[in-house]
Image (cartoon, rainbow, N blue to C red):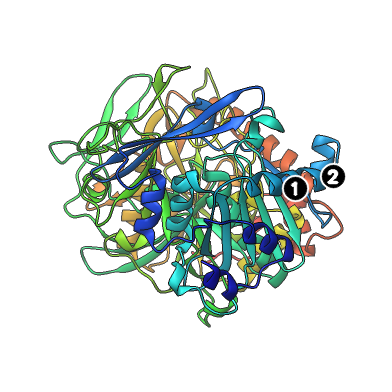
Amino acid sequence: MNNVLNKMVLPIEVLELLSEQSNLIVPRNREHLLELALGEKDNKIFEVAYHVPEMGQVVEAEVVKCKNGVAVNYKEMYMRRRDPHCMVIADHKPTDKPRYKEKYGEEFDRTRELTFEWLGSQELMVVPFMAGGHERGYEAILIAPKNAGFFAAALGDLQGLVPADEVRDGFKPRSIVYLAPPFRHTHFDGKQVVVHNRLEGVHEVFSYNLYPGPSAKKGMYSVLLDIGEEESWVTLHASTVKVITPYENVLTIMHEGASGGGKSEMAEYIHKDAEGHILLARNTVTRDKTYIDLNANCELQPVTDDMAMCHPSVQGDSKKLVVADGEEGWFLRMNHITEYGTDPHYEKMCIHPKQPLIFLNMHATPDSTCLIWEHTLDEETGKPCPNPRVIMPRSYVPNIINEPVEVDIRSFGVRAPICTKEEPSYGIMGMFHILPPALAWLWRLVAPRGHANPSILDSEGMVSEGVGSYWPFATGKKVDQANLLLEQIMRTPSTRYILIPNQNIGAYEVGFMSQWIAREYLARRGSVKFRTEQLEASRCPLLGYSLANLKVDGMDLPKVLLRTHLQPEVGTEGYDKGATILNDFFKEELKKYLSPELHPLGRQIIECCLNDGTLDDYIELMPIRL
């Protein structure tokens, strides 16, 4: 292990911390990490526990060995989802996020010092990895207690483990993650807290909880955003999939959006019932169901699941955005898989994986097969946990694309509630809308988190996820990210934009069917332009163009799913009230960006919205490619 450390270029205090360890562990490979996850090689059950003053031994999680991997379950319901308020900034660089001193009344220095002292009292592991993946990522390390092997294995799968014998001479971490779970109880009142400390040359991430979402995954997203801000590029919060039709047309769609916005689902095959029929929509008032049939599905070749790096080195001359995956593993949510046969694609991947997987918030017993539809019960609610996860190394995903791809269409997903004239809401969006670039930018600034979000804790009503929908993970200033996104859109005029709701369309429940149908339809169209008579300006200008009609495989879809004001349950009355809700929300959020640092064109676009601009006004500011 000393040979490995000698190859690294580490800060003095980190070298001092590690040099005091007599049994320091640097994982040999992935199998070694999975052994550490269970404490000892032959363990079937392992409790991850820590001594906490005045509380005694606190069990944070239980790890169970299964035939197809290890299943991790947290003892507290609160720890099974990401707390959206967990990020705190310790340094003094520019930021719009809460600073440690403002939130806790003191500088971070003393807590940082105590963290090092606590780590020095533990048996430690050092896990070298590549933040952002092996191909284009940045060298980093995790320093963690030995008994947190499952966390280290999760991080290694998500980012890209560098085995001990593959650490290069001169390995210099751009980021260091410190894991100290007991501080959640001793310093932060039981809350998830992740402290970011942006030092010169190294981005420190102090993870004071064991749920990997805010640190092992989104914490590394923060690192990429921080680097991109310095170098004028972004990592988008997006899935990307190359779609190949039965007629061999090829279309690449990138789907952005807040947590729960349908990113992972965009790369899923369309769900069918036992007879092979597709339930398109269910009217929540009349209970009527609408089914359709597709003769043949498109073939899907996934590219990214959640983090799409737009690094300057991969951009070409096509005037289309080019993206590459920023992860080595995908943090897949399985809450929509509630019984056998719901999604045979993922079921096969998870029940018979190429190598053991890491499951979170799923019921399992020793030597059983962890089944992705058996979600852990949240004791406080009596309902299944809404955030069951599996970490899927991208090398295990069939038909995966490892090269950068040009994006034909950028879609933006929004979880929409039911809307009726009796209970109007912002759920007025049709199956999908065509957006001019100026409106596409506004949707990325406002980024509604939307209805019934399963991934995070405060999911009631509509709130803004923040710029790019990746704002919860960014450490800097909103206006800087807004400018980067606008400049990116300006540089890529050949990429087109759409808006897709999920869960509900007016009074109809649709789940993720809207984006699957949009994907199948647009892929079959290919690069064919929309004719003027195929589109009409939406009653609400923020929704761009609505489709006059939509035909897939010779089947006309109901027009009430394209323009919700045609639904008797909604009507123009319910629609216009919903449009007012949406407009007011946009105006309230967009005012926050009107600072002197905002790009001049960005100011014009925002003022257009604040002044109730028309669709033509937005197109005049930035032309649309239909």
- Residue under the image location 80 percent in, 59 percent down: 598
> Residue 548, position in %: x, y?
41, 48
- Asked if residue 499 can be seen in this view, the reply is yes
Q: Which residue is tagged 2? A: 107
Nearer to the camera, 307 or 484: 307
Q: Which residue is tagged 1? A: 112
Task: Say which label, 2 or 1, has the lower sequence index.
Answer: 2
Amino acid type, callout 1: Arg
Farthest front residue?
22
Q: Secondary structure at mark 1?
A: helix
Q: Residue 230 vs residue 453: left or right? A: right
Tell me if mark 1 has few (under 14), some (14-19) or many (20+) residues whose alpha carbon lies within 10 angstroms of its own. some
Farthest left residue?
275
- Asked if residue 549 can be seen in this view, the reply is no
Q: Is residue 296 above or below residue 117?
A: below
**Which quarter of the figure has residue 27?**
bottom left
Nearer to the camera, 473 or 470: 473
> Residue 447, position in %: x, y?
61, 46
Amino acid type, callout 2: Glu
Q: Is residue 492 above or below residue 254?
A: below
- Residue under the image location 37 percent in, 35 percent down: 335
Nearer to the camera, 455 or 602: 455
Q: Secondary structure at mark 2?
A: loop
Q: CA distance from mark 2 to mark 1?
A: 9 Å
Q: Is residue 116 above or below residue 382?
A: below
Q: Residue 226 vs residue 546: left or right? A: right
